[in-house]
Image (tube, rainbow, N blue to C red):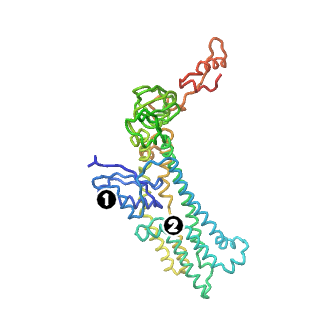
Amino acid sequence: MQNNIQKTILKVTGMHCASCAAVIENALKGKSGVSSANVNFASEKLYLEFNPIEMSIARIQKLLADLGYKTAENAQETEEQAKSEKKEEIKKLKMRFAGALAIGLPLIYMVMGEMIGLPMPMIFESYGLIIQLVLSTAVILVCFDIWKSGFKNLIRLRPNMDSLIFIGTATAYFYSVVVSAFSFFGQEPEMGNVYFESAVFILIFIALGKYLEAVTKGKTGEAIKKLMGLQPKEATVIKNGQEIKIPISEVQVDDIVVVKPGEKIPVDGIIVDGYSGVDEKAITGESIPVEKKKGDEVIGATINKTGVLKFRASRIGKDTMLAQIIKIVEEAMGSKSPIQLLADKVSFYFVPTVLSIAVLSSAVWLILGQPFAFALTVFVAVLIIACPCALGLATPTAVMMGTGLAAQNGILIKSSKALEIAKDVNMIAFDKTGTLTKGEPTVTDIVQINGLASDEVLQIAASVEKNSEHPLPGHCPKRG
């Protein structure tokens, strides 16, 4: 049965907090054929291990659609495409925050201005209640996605952090609407009895939080995007005796690929003709270009430095060494450390617990004789203050940043558990000379010979290597 296990990564959209991730995991782990399901809220990806005989991708996507989430198989996106999509999302959230703030500022001025001695325009004093109603309604419309998410998850009996925000702000808003309605019929309430500003304040801060969260999530995947960006977009192949450029996705195994000096090698293969030095630093960490001749293996995403190479493609797409490195890094980012498992478990039970505490708190104050307005304030305060969106974001973001930065520096971390226990490491053994070097050769000393000055020795060396293709002389700090 174990041999049939298949791994895949799905892109999940529609998650709004860590409890969404927990809902997805719990829904899938109970299904026959699914052996493992880990959701990384920060990268919005679902890492699945399942038996394709018992469970299919289509069924998994249907299950998640029923929960209210959209999924797509995680095809390797180009760096530009991924950046463009993330930039668009961040722009949308930034506009939502800016819109809510611009509309809400007059209302904030009305409520807070008088407290700090600011002058109050006559229109605010004459039509204050109507203006508050109109402005707060406008802010709610701008931030309606938050309400929509919270309400949908509430009626599905799977409340998330947005549900807490929805209940709190909707309670404050509709209570204030009712009070305002009474005032319009001649029963003028005290201004302290309406809470339009509470709903507006909360939605503006939540909109800001979601914008900053999206910015953080966008940064966490930069390392993976940079790794993907190492691969060239096109390859030159020989077809019917002619060299033609084709997208790298169209290269087939056994195609003869031509790589000229300065170009990146598109896929893995075996050299059939040519001689050159290849810079493999990005993949292997080797600082000096490696000599390559007929029969030698070349690695995709490395750089051909000197001669023209022709090679037969042996591994393409997800089978290339670069793709395998990206897979290792992605799996490390998707794996969960012990502390993250605890955070996810807490967030899953957190929302219903907070709802219960909010109801209990307001009920206790009512029983103790406090007015309904006070009990309502307590109810809203408990719901809003207890929204720990950072609880589900902090750990996966830290893991993604750690593994991503390590990958950029040539260090592959195979799981977040390994990253967590690395804090206890107090000794590291390196098994290769040069592992801790700068990554490229440089001239450190010029030795005088036969009475020649250092500049003369350097001038002679520079003239000798002027037309050389050897990789080392090119790193001379200055030419004669």
What distance separates the C-alpha of mark 1 from that of mark 2?
Answer: 30 Å
> Callout 1: 10 Å neighbours few (<14), some, many (20+)?
some
Q: Residue furthest bottom?
A: 186
List the single residue furthest toward the left.
1
| Residue that mark 1 sits on | 31
Where disc 1 sits, the SS reads: loop
Instruction: Specify the label residue 475 is tagged with.
Output: none
The foreground one among 96 and 208 is 96
Any part of residue 337 in sight: no
User: Which residue appears at 44% of the width and 30% of the height?
Assistant: 310
Judge from the rendering whether residue 51 lies leftward or rightward of residue 151; answer left or right.
left
Q: What is the residue that sits farthest to the top in this orientation?
A: 450
In the rendering, at what x and y percent does residue 252 appear?
Answer: 39, 39
Amino acid under disc 2: Ile
Answer with mark 1 or mark 2, whichever residue precedes in sequence.
Answer: 1
Residue type at tag 1: Lys
Q: Specify the quadrant that holds the C terminus.
A: top right
Viewer can see residue 144: yes
The residue to which callout 2 is attached is 146
Examine the rendered structure and indicate whether residue 162 appears above or below residue 89: below
Q: Position of residue 286 (x, y in %)?
A: 48, 31
Q: Indicate the position of residue 148 as horizontal and vertical percent values.
A: 48, 68
Q: How many marks?
A: 2
Considering depth in this image, is 328 or 231 the residue closer to the camera? 231
Describe residue 200's horizontal placement relative to residue 82 as left or right: right
Rendered view: 7 above or below 64: above
Quadrant in the picture for residue 189: bottom right
Q: Secondary structure at mark 2?
A: helix
Q: In this orientation, which residue lies closer to the viewer: 129 or 113?
A: 129
